[in-house]
Image (tube, helix red, strand yellow):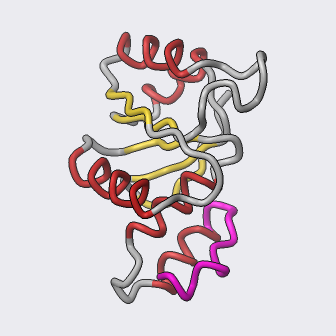
């Protein structure tokens, strides 16, 4: 079962999901899944994006692969912003723990004067984003 952590009405994050979790994700009303975890990062036991994509498409969900390691680069933040702007919501993004996904989401809002709101939304989902304050 996927550990879905709601950040806003239109965005949530989760640790690694598998093909079997897509049923629950679809039933929860999500329309788009963003994969931020590179295939193979967790070894042979990690579910592959292709399997998750195939299952998502069976349920009519959009699947977007945007894998990255470490902190999101400006290019990843820009692409995340584009996806968030264009994708049908609500959106579920996943990586190993959800931290990469929520960090990319938070940095999309950098410079908008919303640091407190972003940090609070992250805390509500179980993530401490306070180290990003200067970038938000």
> x and y percent of residue 135 in the render?
50, 82
Q: Which residue occupies 78% across, 23% down?
A: 43
Determine which quarter of the picture holds residue 37: top right
- The range drawn in magenta is 124-136
> x and y percent of residue 119 in the render?
57, 77
Q: Does 42 appear above or below 87?
A: above
Q: Does 70 appear above or below 38?
A: below
Q: Does 77 appear above or below 65?
A: below
Q: Nearer the viewer, residue 48 or 69?
A: 69
In this rendering, would 19 be left or right of 115?
right
Q: Which residue occupies 68% across, 25% down?
A: 40
**Viewport quadrant of the N terminus:** top right
Outermost residue toward the left? Answer: 86
> x and y percent of residue 4 in the render?
60, 43
Magenta highlight on residue 89 = no
Q: How many marks?
A: 0
In this rendering, would 80 be left or right of 127?
left
> x and y percent of residue 128 in the render?
69, 71
In this rendering, would 131 be left or right of 33?
right
Determine which quarter of the picture holds residue 64: top left
Q: Which residue occupies 37% across, 53% down?
A: 80
Q: Which residue occupies 77% across, 16% down?
A: 44
Q: Does 60 appear above or below 110?
A: above
In this rendering, would 83 be left or right of 46?
left
């Amino acid at each position: 079962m996927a550990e879905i952590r709601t950040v806003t009405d239109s965005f949530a994050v989760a640790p690694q999901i598998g093909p079997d979790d897509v049923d629950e994700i679809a039933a929860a009303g999500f329309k788009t899944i963003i994969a931020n975890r590179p295939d193979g990062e967790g070894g042979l036991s990690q579910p592959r994006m292709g399997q998750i994509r195939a299952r998502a498409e069976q349920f009519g969900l959009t699947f977007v692969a945007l894998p990255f390691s470490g902190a999101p680069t400006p290019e990843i933040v820009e692409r995340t912003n584009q996806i968030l702007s264009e994708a049908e919501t609500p959106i579920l993004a996943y990586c190993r723990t959800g931290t990469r996904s929520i960090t990319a989401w938070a940095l999309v809002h950098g410079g908008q004067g919303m640091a407190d709101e972003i940090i609070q939304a992250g805390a509500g989902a179980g993530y401490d984003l306070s180290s990003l304050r200067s970038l938000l």
